[in-house]
Amino acid sequence: MNKETWKPFQGFPHLMVSNLGNVYHLDKKQLVTKKPNGNIQVWKDGKGKNYSYYKLLKIHFPWEWIKDLDDDEECKEHPTHKGYFFTTKGRCFSLHSYKFCKVGLVKGFPYPRVTIHSQPKLIHIMLLETFRDNPEGFPDVLHYNDVKDDYRLENLYWGEDKKNWEDSIRNGRRNLKSYSVLCNGETLSVSNLNLFCKERNIPYLKTLRRVNKGMDVML
């Protein structure tokens, strides 16, 4: 358990607040009683104000949450979404709510996400944007083991569709099928028809139909 430390309560000179969320009244020499919901009400000039545990820590101990990280877990603030910190294990902490963000999934979509500034964001993309530069401008964040919900930093890297295809074959998640493609009168052996179409800017489904019929895909 973290050792309890104390600081002056901002705006209330007669109070002290601790990193465990306790408030001490200097005049009465006693702790301020918490409400059933855990909040604390403090008074000044006849006016009461409620503080939650998270709000107390956010104001007085903004970095207290780092003590909850594992020994092998590092954290870093996202370069553009200020106030949101990602850890190497894929956790996201918000200084705005002073809580770890809840991880969610959308039915039929395998990539976990968190809500940032009221917008859903894919964790694997946000994590790599935080910890890894992308000097070559690769368009995609890929998973070494091809497991879409394994968003540990060590499992992610910048890449493109061709590399993603190679990973899926290496990990046994895709069967390697070769196509015999007639292209400008020349017969080619193509293992990745999708990539073949992208490189030539031709539609995949139309090309697949022409391949199955033995027609030249470029005519």
Image (tube, grey):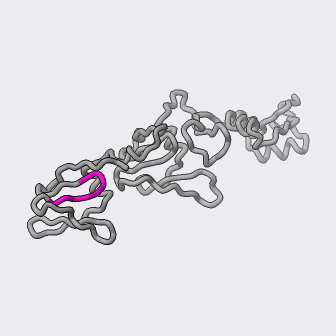
Compared with residue 35, is residue 12 higher up or lower down, i.e. above or below? above
Q: Position of residue 130 (x, y in %)?
A: 46, 38
Q: Is residue 61 above or below residue 39?
A: above
Q: Is residue 44 left or right of residue 77?
A: left
Task: Based on the picture, tell me whether residue 22 belongs to the magenta stretch.
Answer: yes
At x 56%, y 41%, the residue is 152
Residue 180 higher or lower than 3, as above or below: above
| Count of marks overlaid on the render | 0
Q: Is residue 26 visible?
A: yes
Considering every residue shown, the one lying at the far bottom of the view is 36
- x, y percentage for residue 12? 14, 57
Which residue sits at x=15%, y=57%?
15
- Asked whether 151 or 160 is in front, the reply is 151
Give percent across and percent down for residue 208: 82, 44
Over which residues does the magenta segment extend? Answer: 18-25
- The quadrant of the rendering that contains the C terminus is top right
The one nearer the camera, 46 or 79, is 46
Q: Residue 23 occupies which quadrant of the picture?
A: bottom left
